[in-house]
Amino acid sequence: MMKFAVALLFISINFYTYNYMASEAVYPPRESFDTFPLEFGEWTCSERQEMPPGVENNLGVTDYLICNFVRPETHDMVGVYFGYHESQVREEGGGAGENSIHPPAHCLPGSGWDIIDNQTVTVNIPGLPQSPATVKRMIIAKGELRQLVFYWYQSRGRVISEDWKKILYVGLDRALRSRTDGSLTRFTIRIIQKDEARAEAAFFDLAPLILANASRYIPE
């Protein structure tokens, strides 16, 4: 029932926007992820990864960062992904097609990963536009491999964990601010010898360093 109500509200807001509040889309200034630092104290990323063109087109990202940050002394590794969408509507003002951020909980099973735990948790991380904030925490598995995943949508000054809220705020901000930009932030940490606590500690060690630089790339 909640999903239906959100979908109906989203459609109503967009109808109102198209017909009564049509205005030029706002694209806030930002820096390209090409300039994002690759070294934070003990953590370094040796090279940025690139998506295959088909995957990039399917996701609809305007700009992105994929980098595995490694701490050599402890052999911890954290995969960092930022996917920025300048617009979540393919044709601003025309209503023809969406360019929504793809939820990891929907995409990971398609990549062969099983989600064995999925929670919404509260975190307090310096660098977030809202802190404490609620984010998604998952454990995923592929064969014997286990990974810890934290992700959230960071859009127009908000930290959003739920898909329906992301959809709702896209409609509201389009109507009131002429903005539909947003991003997905995801940290993926390999779990070594079933030690989830170690993986979580690695996330909380690196995340504040990464997020302290994120505001130049993800506009509020």
Image (cartoon, rainbow, N blue to C red):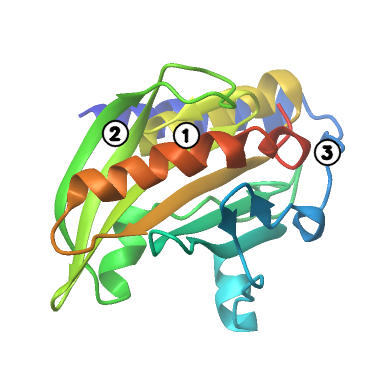
Q: Is residue 149 left or right of residue 217?
A: left
Q: Is residue 99 left or right of residue 144?
A: right
Q: Position of residue 59 (x, y in %)?
A: 56, 65
In contact (CB < 8 Å): disc 3 and disc 1: no
Residue designated by label 3: 27
Residue 99 visible? The answer is no
In contact (CB < 8 Å): disc 2 and disc 3: no
Indicate the amino acid at tag 2.
Phe
Q: Quadrant of residue 124?
A: top left
Front of the two marks 2 and 3: 3
Q: Position of residue 47 (x, y in %)?
A: 66, 73
Residue 203 visible? The answer is yes
Q: Position of residue 17 (x, y in %)?
A: 68, 27
Which of disc 1 and disc 3 is earlier in sequence? 3
Residue designated by label 2: 4
Q: Which mark is residue 166?
A: 1
Query: How far apart are labels 3 and 1 at the CA level?
Result: 18 Å
Indicate the amino acid at tag 1.
Lys
Q: Is residue 212 above or below residue 104?
A: above
Q: Residue at x 32, y 39 (%)?
A: 136
Query: How far apart are labels 2 and 1 at the CA level?
Result: 15 Å
Q: Nearer the viewer, residue 119 or 7?
A: 119
